Image (cartoon, rainbow, N blue to C red):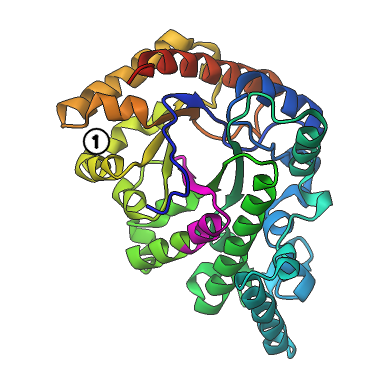
Amino acid sequence: MAATFEFTPRGLAAGIGSMPFVEAGPALQLIRRNMPVIPHWPQLPRRGGDEGFVHQFLDPLVRIGLLEKRGDKVVFPVDSQDWPNRLTEFYSVYLAAEAGDEKALKTFAFPPASASGFYAFMEDIRANGTGTARYLKGHLAGPLTIGFQLKDERGRLAYYEEQLRDVLVKTLAMHACWQASELSKMSLPVIIFVDEPGVRVYGSSSYITVTREMVLNDLNAVFAGIHTAGGLAGVHSCDAIDWSLLYEANLEIVNLDIYQFGESLLPYVKEMKKYLERGGVIAWGIVPTLDKAFDEDADTLLARLERLWTELGKRGVERVMLLRQSLITPACGTGLLEPALAERIYLLTREVSEKVMAMAAGI
């Protein structure tokens, strides 16, 4: 673990990131009302393509020319005569940022037009203070998730091309460092989640060339960027995966969709115990990001979570650790949902959190 501050959340509520609003105002109100201790900046995909991962997290590559828009696609122009020079420019900026050059690090910042929720969040804190917040949470897309969506101009997936994967990982690591640094200017501890549904490819017969070493090295590089800025690193994955992979990684928080995939934790209890014993936190995504949220209440969701904890207890995971080292979250982001459903999900997250916090009090 590379924790830079002690984190024992005891059931606090946190969000994932994306929200279904065009303007930041309603999103910030919903966050402030339901997640006042760990507020997060809202990602607003309904604002359009500028809020997508290319412009949010990979803007330096677009400006340097390592990514180009061609029609409705964005590709790495590896056959360009100028490609070597563009790579040289990128690595020069990266090395300067890694060495602590603040101007170089700002190269990896969000463009204002591509992260309106982030800048509105920061402005709101400057204007109104941090209130009851004890932590601030940010997030970014992970290297596998991005690497399996982008291709070079020959049609090859970026994640399979060593050079391109290296550029992506280094860009995300420096962005993560910049984001954690910016949030820390608000004088509160910072948590950054790497949203990485793409980690599900590990172990799949369709992706046999993706090795454990590749995934760990790439994720750990991004986590190192967060740790360099003094933040805690988490990962969000909304699928059933080999959880031992994430327990082994150099991070502090593992977040998953417990509502649908809670039982996927059971084969990895041994690894979970080691992870918890060294201080790791589980962020239990117990609130479904589905219409089923209208059919559930805090008691039914807590009962579902208790059943899983009972099964883990039978396998030797101490309940005290589960309660002490737990966050409560939605199962996933809410960016593609209707606002009324997102409001229900955030309310349920707060209500389940309050119940878990009461159970964890005094532990």
Is 226 within the magenta?
yes
336 above or below 320?
below
In the image, 272 versus 186, the foreground residue is 186
The residue range painted magenta reads 221-238
Q: 10 Å neighbourhood of mark 1: few (<14), some, or many (≥20)?
A: some
227 above or below 41?
below
110 above or below 262?
below
**Which image quadrant for residue 37?**
top right
- Residue 287 seen from this side: no
| Residue 298 placement (x, y as % from top left) | 47, 11
The residue to which callout 1 is attached is 266
The residue at the point 54 percent across, 52 percent down is 230
| Residue 277 placement (x, y as % from top left) | 26, 41
In the image, 59 versus 92, the foreground residue is 92
Q: What is the quadrant of the C terminus in the image?
A: top left
The residue at the point 48 percent across, 72 percent down is 160
Is 222 within the magenta?
yes
- Residue 94 seen from this side: yes
